[in-house]
Image (spheres, rainbow, N blue to C red):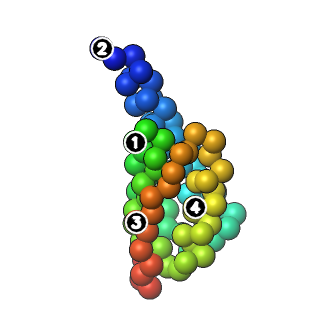
Amino acid sequence: LNIKQVNTALTDALITAKVETAVLKAKVLDDESIPLVGINATTTNGVVTLSGSVKNAQSIAAIIKRVNAIRAVKKIITNLEIKDKV
């Protein structure tokens, strides 16, 4: 058993939870058009990948700003798409 690997998995899970909270904060505080469901976040070694659909570019900017504020995030890969009907 590789202890470092376990710590990384725990850290990634924690980051993902913080990212989900950040998306919720972005919705409540920055842009209420951000959908509550459909924004997916995964974390691998501190690299967060976001996917899903939002209504406008401001939503993406708000989400990225909030995720960027999470200390353990090393990089953000965004696959968020803009769609009129979310």
Name the amino acid type tagged 3. Asn
Mark 1 burial class by Cα count in 10 Å: few <14, some 14-19, many 20+: some
- In this rendering, does residue 33 appear at all? yes
Please report whichever mark, 4 or 3, sits nearer to the chain's N-terminal start.
4
Q: Amino acid at mark 1?
A: Thr
Label placed on residue 64: 4
Q: Earlier in the sequence, mark 2 or mark 3?
A: 2
Identify whether 44 is placed above or below 4. Answer: below
Question: Mark 3 or mark 1: which comes first in sequence?
Answer: 1
Residue 33 located left or right of residue 82:
right
Q: Which residue is mark 2?
A: 1
Residue neighbourhood size for the residue with mark 3, other residues' Cα within 10 Å, grouped as few (<14), some (14–19), many (≥20) = some
Residue 79: x percent and y percent?
Answer: 40, 66
Give the residue at x 56% y 57%: 23
How would you rate the neighbour count of disc 2 (Cα within 10 Å): few for under 14, some for 14-19, many for 20 or more?
A: few
**Residue projecting furthest to the bottom:** 84
Q: Is residue 58 above or below residue 38?
A: below
> What type is the residue that disc 2 sits on?
Leu
Which residue is under mark 1? Answer: 44
